[in-house]
Amino acid sequence: MTAQPYFPTLPKRGRPSKYLAIRDWLAARIADGDFCHGAQLPSEHDIMARFSVSRVTARQAFDDLRRLGLVESVRGKGYFVRRFKAVHDLLRLQSFGEMMAPLGVATHSKVVEIGEVPAPPDAASALRLSAGEPVLRVVRARFAGGTVISVDISFFPADIGRKLVPLNLVSNDIFVLLEKDLSMELGFAELTIEAAPAPAEYAAHIGVSEAETVLRIRRLTHDAGGRPVDFEYLYARLDAVQFRVRSARW
C-alpha cells in the first residue's frame, strides 16, 4: 500500500495565492517522482481539509496542473498523473535532460549494465573501429519524475569510455559529461527512427512485454571534428516520446 503523502501547512505570507502554493507543491511532488505516472492525486476534498482552503481554490490548483499537461481528471474518480513525454526537437542535438527541462521534470538514470566488450558489427562500423575492438557498453534506464521513459544502449570507443566509467552516470546526461568533464565539443548526430520489437532482456525496464512494438532510435553522435564518439539505440514506449521539427515549404 502506498504511504499517504505528507501535506505541509501553507505559509500565511509571502505567496500571492493559496491555489498557486498548492499547484506548485503538487507539481514539485510529481516532478520528483513522489506521484508517478498513473498515481491518483489527493482529492479536492483532501486538499480543502488539509490546506484549509475552499473547493474553488483546490479546483484552481488542479485546473492549472491540467493546463500544464501534468494531470488528467477522470469523471467520478478524481485526478491522476499523466505520463510524461520526451519532446525531441529534431533540429537540435539534445540530451535527455534537455528534452525534459521544459516540463520542469527531474530526471535521472539507472545504470543497468556497464563494461568493456568487443565491438559488435553495427557499433564497430558506426564508430569506425575494427570488428572486435574494445568499446564501453552502457545500458541505462532513463527516468523522468519517477517514470521510465526509455532504455538506452550506448557504445563508446575505449579511449572515451574508460574516462566515463568513474563519472556520475546516474545524475548526469552523458552529453554533459562529454562536454564538461572530458572537454569534448559535440558537433552533430545522425538519427534513424523506426518501430521495432522491444529487446527481450530490457522489455521489463521499458515497461512493456517481450517483443511488444516500441520506438527505436538509432543515433550516432560525432564530435565537432567529425569523429563518431557515441553510438546508441534508444528504446521507448510509443506513447513516451514526441518529435518536433519545423519544415520549410522551399
Image: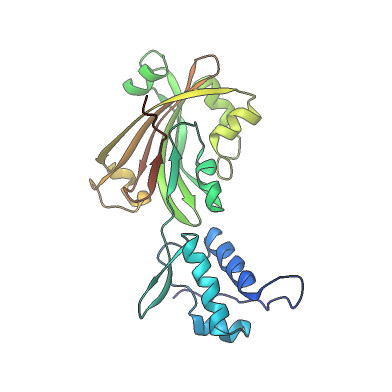
Residue extending farthest to the right is: 13
Above or below, 128 against 199 in this view is above
Above or below, 8 against 244 in this view is below
Q: Quadrant of the C terminus?
A: top left
Residue 101 image position (x, y, % from top left): 55, 47
Q: Residue at x 39, y 32 (%)?
A: 247
Above or below, 23 against 204 in this view is below
Q: Nearer the viewer, residue 38 or 159?
A: 38
Residue 26 image position (x, y, % from top left): 56, 68
Residue 29 image position (x, y, % from top left): 56, 65
Specify whether residue 30 is in view. yes
Residue 63 image position (x, y, % from top left): 49, 70
Question: Residue 97, located in which quarter of the rendered image?
Answer: top right
Q: Residue at x 56, y 63 (%)?
A: 27
Q: Residue at x 35, y 41 (%)?
A: 235
Q: Quadrant of the N terminus?
A: bottom left
Q: Residue at x 29, y 41 (%)?
A: 199
Q: Nearer the viewer, residue 204 or 113?
A: 204
Specify whether residue 35 is in view. no
Above or below, 74 against 48 in this view is above
**Protein image colouring:** rainbow
